[in-house]
Amino acid sequence: MRAVLPFLILLAGGRAEEDDSTCSFGDSSGAGKTPGGRSTAGVTSELDVDIVNTGKSAISIYWGGDATNTQEVFLIAIEPGASKRVHSFAGHILEIRDEKSGELRMKHVVANGADNVLTITDDDAWDNIPDVDGGQLNLESVQGGLEQLGSDLFPKSVDYISQIPSRSREVPMGAKFRNFYPFDIEFYFDDGTEDGAYNGIIPSMGRSAINTYATHSFILCKRGTKDKFGRVTMKPKKNIIIIKPNDKEYMKDVKRTQFYKDTMKELSFMRSYQNRTGLPWLSYYPRSPPILHMWSADYIGQEHLVEIADHGEHPIKLRLKVISLRPRVFYISGLLLPEEIGHLIDISKDKVKRSSVGNSADKGFVTNTRTSRTAWIERTESDVTNRLFMRFSRVLNISDDRLTHTRNAEKLQVVQYEKGQKYSPHHDFNDRGSPPQRFLTLFMYLKSAKKDGGTGFPLAFGRRGMKVTPRDGSALLWYNMLPDGNADEMSLHEGQPVGEGEKWGCNLWVWDPVANF
């Protein structure tokens, strides 16, 4: 055990929380039996977890298994004001439940080198977590569901992920980080391994943003070291995390900086916006409404007709059909011709390499959340790609001169997925410290997998989710922003794992008001 400097974490909507950040670096090994009777041979460390119940109701602690065993076993009950110690192993999951109702309040992954002291307060109670608000997030409940699309799309090309709304308490969420330490911070998702899974860098006196889930926990380290000095556990509706030293003299100087003053304004605005709308503000602040055109989505099955004359003498008609209101998603049949599909795949085959994720501070990194391969294609690569950009201009109702790489459009990103490869749920937007943001995503299907490999929107339709597997040459258009300039948290999407064969797709991202990449 060794002590490090305490730190403060301030979460929007909540109070500042002090954490003594006492870190344990267990290196012993042991073998025995888990509460479920399974051998622990090969588990790296035995660890003690101290659980303190400061709430007003009793809690029950269950062993929730590990990555290979999800058996649930009752361990102990803890009365209000009491504390108890649980013996466990790195990688194991502890579930904290309300003793009376049995409702899950928190999950904790036991980790080496982590502060395995859990303080349970009434603020952690899951009854403070709202279910999806029908008026704000599930507009389809008023306008109808996917059944309104008709048999040409539903349920073959467009379907629900589940017939029952997800009630997982690991609620997807976007999160912003602000770092007031005098050094850069590396943060690691606590996945039960000794070091955790690397998630990026928060620059000193700077910012970062990620996609995450309520209950997920992140270990904070000084950049370039394994010096673990703190931990952040995500909570619903707490979408901005301010990390600052518990050093009053140091903070006196920090509070005089413009970055600190701007962050406090942002914090106040985010609280006000969430109270007013029920939604987290995930865009850069301040941010004006988008200036680019946004197709309306008033009801499921609504269509917008676009005529395009780049196929010869006779113009073709493309229909943008609304398949979801929040997020705002459109299905476009026949956007690409077979010869155009072949051309895009041919010019990409020699360029594809392992996909990465990341923020501007670390320029991207490889992670198991995204296992595809990627190639970038410029508009001027060929006459075909230039013609496609002109067609995209008509489909998006955005002037062609804006769809250049110096104004609003990124290069085409061609992606290849082989069997088992995926891209876990994520957002295409990010708060990068300035107003420009990815406004829309146009994702084109070049070659569909023989089995599975669709595009999923887990939060659509009241968390029943929506999965789409368009025909080759078709496309999905969705907006990553709301009309007021906020980023749309509901635009969370995923490239679902390929079951058989391979999948080729192509992304076009358009920024508003200008590009920043």
Image (cartoon, grey):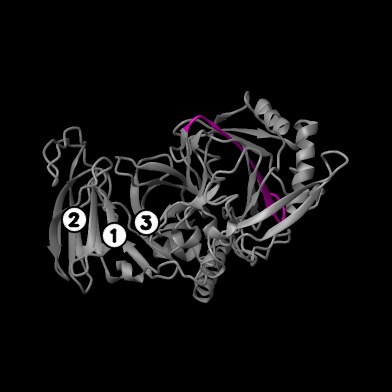
The secondary structure that dominates the magenta segment is: strand
Between 362 and 74, the residue placed more toward the observer is 74
Camera sees residue 203: no
Residue 197 on the magenta segment: no
Q: Do the residues under discs 1 and 2 have CB atoms within 8 angstroms?
A: no
Badge 1, how many Cα within 10 Å: few under 14, some, many 20+?
A: many
Residue appearing at x 13%, y 55% in the figure: 75
Judge left or right: residue 258 versus residue 183. right
**Type of amino acid at the residue the image marks with label 2:** Tyr
Between 362 and 288, the residue placed more toward the observer is 288
**SS at mark 3 in the image:** loop
The region drawn magenta spans 500-515
**Type of amino acid at the residue the image marks with label 3:** Glu
Camera sees residue 286: yes
Judge left or right: residue 84 versus residue 479. left
**Earlier-in-chain disc, 1 versus 2:** 2
Residue appearing at x 78%, y 30% in the figure: 382
**SS at mark 2 in the image:** strand
- Residue 294 spot, x, y in % from top left: 70, 60
Q: Quadrant of the C terminus?
A: top right
**SS at mark 1 in the image:** strand
- Residue 403 spot, x, y in % from top left: 76, 46
| Image vertical order of residue 217 relative to residue 374, above or below | below
Q: Circle 2 sits on which residue? A: 62
Residue 512 on the magenta segment: yes
**Type of amino acid at the residue the image marks with label 1:** Met
Badge 3, how many Cα within 10 Å: few under 14, some, many 20+?
A: some
Q: Circle 3 sits on which residue? A: 170
- Residue 178 spot, x, y in % from top left: 49, 57
Distance CA(mark 3)–CA(mark 2): 17 Å
Judge left or right: residue 199 versus residue 393. left
Q: Which mark is residue 106?
A: 1
